[in-house]
Image (tube, rainbow, N blue to C red):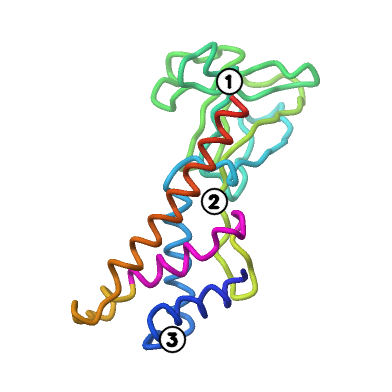
Amino acid sequence: MIASEIIARFNLQVDDSSELSSTEELALLNQCYREIQNDRSWEWLKTEETATTSISVPYIALPSDFRTLSPNMEGAYQYGNESVVYVGVDYEPFRVINFSNRRDYRDRNGICYIDIPNSRLVFTKQPSSARSVEYDYLMKAPDLTTSAEPVFDDAYHEVLAYGMAAKFDAIQLTNKNESYSRENEAMYLSILEQMQMVDSQIKIIIA
């Protein structure tokens, strides 16, 4: 379903009583969309980035849609909860440490960290040659336009309509006796639970 179809489904859920403008409806849709993205590290938000190290600065820019690194088994196996990025044609693993620990690894090779405010992946030792860098990350999906589809499976697109409808009555201050907010929220949570279960099954399969 494209966004305009999801909004139409939302209007059916609230019996076409919405007095929201088209701009407000789209904003409400994207609010629900972002909340679902923030629910967990969804497999459908994972993507790959490739870059090249610089010999003049010790960092590379993060993608504009970067949310966080995707955990990988090699990093978890070697360093607990930390991840690795792969550098060079031989895919040398570079350990990704916490930002707050960066001073403990000054001028150490094979170490890097994420600098979120400056949108950078920073190496603790200045690279001496241009080498490829590859890693997986969780993206921030772009806000929906009326003609765009959510990035997750279309079997679950209605979750957004129910999420919008659950929020609608609070926005409109609808009388509780006339509100279907609980029913809409229950449907929203039911579909979201299905999405979570499928996501967990995928994670088990690929672990």
- Residue 101 as seen in the image, left or right of residue 110: left
SS assignment at label 2:
loop
Q: Is residue 166 magenta?
A: yes
Mark number displayed over residue 73: 1
Is the residue marked by circle 2 packed among few (<14), some (14-19), or many (20+) residues within 10 Å? some
Give the vertical position of 17 relative to 13 (above or below). Answer: below
Amino acid type of the residue tagged 2 in the rendering? Lys
Give the vertical position of 112 relative to 149 (above or below). Answer: above
Q: Main secondary structure of the magenta part?
A: helix
Location of the N terminus by quadrant is bottom right
Location of the C terminus by quadrant is top right
Amino acid type of the residue tagged 1 in the rendering? Met
The answer to which image quadrant residue 112 occupies is top right
Give the vertical position of 54 relative to 161 (above or below). Answer: above
Is the residue marked by circle 1 packed among few (<14), some (14-19), or many (20+) residues within 10 Å? some
- Residue 5 as seen in the image, left or right of residue 162: right
SS assignment at label 1:
helix
* Residue 10 location (% of width, % of height): 45, 76
The residue labelled by disc 2 is: 140
Distance of label 3 from label 2 (alpha carbons): 26 Å
Marks 1 & 3, CB-CB < 8 Å contact: no
For this orientation, the residue located farthest to the right is 89
* Residue 144 location (% of width, % of height): 57, 67
User: The magenta stretch spans which residues?
Assistant: 151-167
Label whose residue precedes the other's in the sequence (3 or 2): 3
* Residue displayed at 46% across by 70% down: 161
* Residue displayed at 61% across by 60% down: 154
Label whose residue precedes the other's in the sequence (1 or 2): 1
The residue labelled by disc 3 is: 21
Marks 3 & 2, CB-CB < 8 Å contact: no
